Image: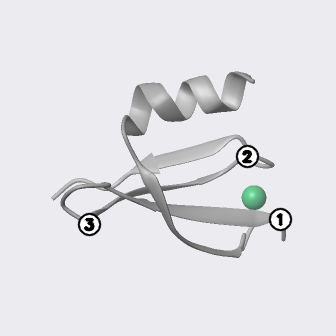
């Protein structure tokens, strides 16, 4: 699926931290954390085709 490829490209290795209701479309907005450091790395909504990487 294209969106998964996009997530791999933008966020890389990741695991789900939590899922909230997307404020834009009402579907699922997923927050991802790094599987090793447990730091939040980004969020995404597959319905909006939206991916954001958090920069620190
Ligand atoms: Zn959305």
User: Where does the image place residue 45, in percent across and percent down from the top left?
Assistant: 68, 53
Between 3 and 26, which is closer to the camera in this rendering?
3
Marks 2 and 1: CB-CB under 8 Å? yes
Instruction: Say above or below: 56 vs 19.
Output: above
Q: CA distance from mark 2 to mark 1?
A: 8 Å
Q: CA distance from mark 1 to mark 3?
A: 24 Å
Quadrant position of residue 27:
bottom right
Q: Which mark is residue 38?
A: 3
Instruction: Say above or below: 53 vs 20.
Output: above
Residue under label 2, please give it.
46
Residue under label 1, please give it.
27
Element assignment for label 2 = loop
Element assignment for label 3 = loop
Disc 2 or 3, which lies upstream in sequence? Answer: 3
Marks 1 and 3: CB-CB under 8 Å? no
Q: Quadrant of ligand 1?
A: bottom right
Between 50 and 5, which is closer to the camera in this rendering?
5
Element assignment for label 1 = loop
Marks 2 and 3: CB-CB under 8 Å? no
Can you tell me whether the CB of the residue at mark 3 lies under 8 Å from the nearest atom of ligand 1?
no
Could you tell me which residue is drawn at 75 percent across and 48 percent down?
Answer: 48
Between 8 and 36, which is closer to the camera in this rendering?
36
Mark 1 neighbour class, 10 Å CA radius: few under 14, some 14 to 19, many 20 or more: some
Could you tell me which residue is drawn at 22 percent across and 55 percent down?
Answer: 36
Can you tell me whether the CB of the residue at mark 2 lies under 8 Å from the nearest atom of ligand 1?
yes
User: Where does the image place residue 28, in percent across and percent down from the top left?
Assistant: 75, 65
Can you tell me whether the CB of the residue at mark 1 lies under 8 Å from the nearest atom of ligand 1?
yes
């Amino acid at each position: 699926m294209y969106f998964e490829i996009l997530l791999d490209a933008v966020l890389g290795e990741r695991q789900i931290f939590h899922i909230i209701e997307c404020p834009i479309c009402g579907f699922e907005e997923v927050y991802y954390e790094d599987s090793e450091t447990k730091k939040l790395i980004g969020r995404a909504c597959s319905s909006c085709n939206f991916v954001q990487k958090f920069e620190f």
